[in-house]
Amino acid sequence: MDLQAQQGLMSTYREAWRNRGVVGWVASAALVTFYCLLYWTDLFDGVSVAVGLRNKWYLYGLIYSIGMSAGAVYYLRRHGNSRYNQLRMAVNVSVQIALGWTLPFVMPLIGQPEFYFGYFWPLKYDYLYPHTLQSLPVYLAVYTVVGSLVVAPAATIFFGKRWYCSWVCGCGALANTFGDPWRHLTSPSTKAWRFEKIAIHSVMALAFLSLAVVVAGQLLNFKSDAFYQFSESVKSWYGFGISAVLAGVVGTGLYPLLGPRLWCRNFCPMAAMLGVIQKAGRFRIRVKPDMCISCGNCTTYCEMGIDVRSYAQSNQSFTRAACVGCGMCAHVCPRGVLRLENHFDDAADKQRQGLSAVDY
């Protein structure tokens, strides 16, 4: 039964640790406590030294990699009969181990700065700050600027945001693997969707605004020390509120209660930016007309809270800014109604497929 796509749904709502039961609440409290201790105490600095690591962030990266690897095994035992899932998990774990832990650890040993190649602005909010770019070798500064402003948007036009959010991003990779047992807890309600639209676009606007303020402050430091101090405060508060509280404590700590994509769905500025670009690109989920039996598996398993069933019932192929292209809706459909595609259609085909009806 582990190889059957529908197997997971049979037990999803019977296991307390996966359905906001007592064990789920305890697990969430433990995760929140872990992140609070990590960000705001020195506890893990001592532990990292004891195990021979440079600082607590390398220890965290090691724990992160182990959690992802274990989660990938769990995921593949349930959904590994799909080639798409097998490749996605392999890339997720490989990128984390190579780009998220090994390279940042090794580079200082050979005289290079610690650098995370798997992240781009605005997710890595300080990568486009003038002081950051000035501190990097030319090749890393070019990689950062071109990757953030050219490669990421262009790849999203051609492949959708899934190339990053479901294959490369460390936040998404943790949600794909370690967070998979709780994917069904993401709410598909209209109320949750409305909150998502307001929250994620607000954070995206804040990311752009804070970048402008910090860039202006650092470039004009020689003219206005007061404005520079203000810009540094903006940088500090953005790092605390968005990167620590929302991405870490809330975004990961509440996996067992609100699903694994709480950060990606509601607060990630890069997910918001790539989602806007995705709407104009080639990615879509195609619906085969008149085949849906309304089982609801697609909506239940959507980690982004998209009511996929409503599109399938209406025979509407669609593009949603929130969709990260994980492919689970297509994987768990018992009739093969859904298909992930990257294809520019002419106007007639778009009209036939219902692609003009895009929610946001």
Image (tube, rainbow, N blue to C red):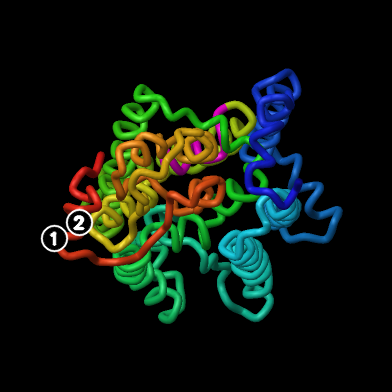
Q: Residues within 10 Å of mark 2 (few under 14, many from 20)?
A: some
Crowd class of label 1 (few under 14; some 14 to 19; many from 20; radius 10 Å)? few
Give me the disc on residue 196: none
Q: Residue 198 or 309: which is nearer the viewer?
A: 309
Q: Which residue is drawn at 76% across and 40% down?
A: 43
The residue singled out by tag 2 in the image is: 350
Vertical position of residue 310 compared to residue 22: above or below: below
The residue at the far left in this view is 347
Q: CA gap, disc 1 to disc 2?
A: 5 Å
- Residue at horizontal 55 percent and vertical 51 percent from the top: 331
Instruction: Report the residue at 30% width, 56% height from top.
Output: 278
Q: In which quarter of the image is residue 256?
A: top right
Instruction: Answer above or below: position of 98 versus 320.
Output: below
What's the residue type where badge 2 is placed?
Lys
Q: Nearer the viewer, residue 67 or 114?
A: 67
* Residue found 41% across the figure and 80% down from its top: 138
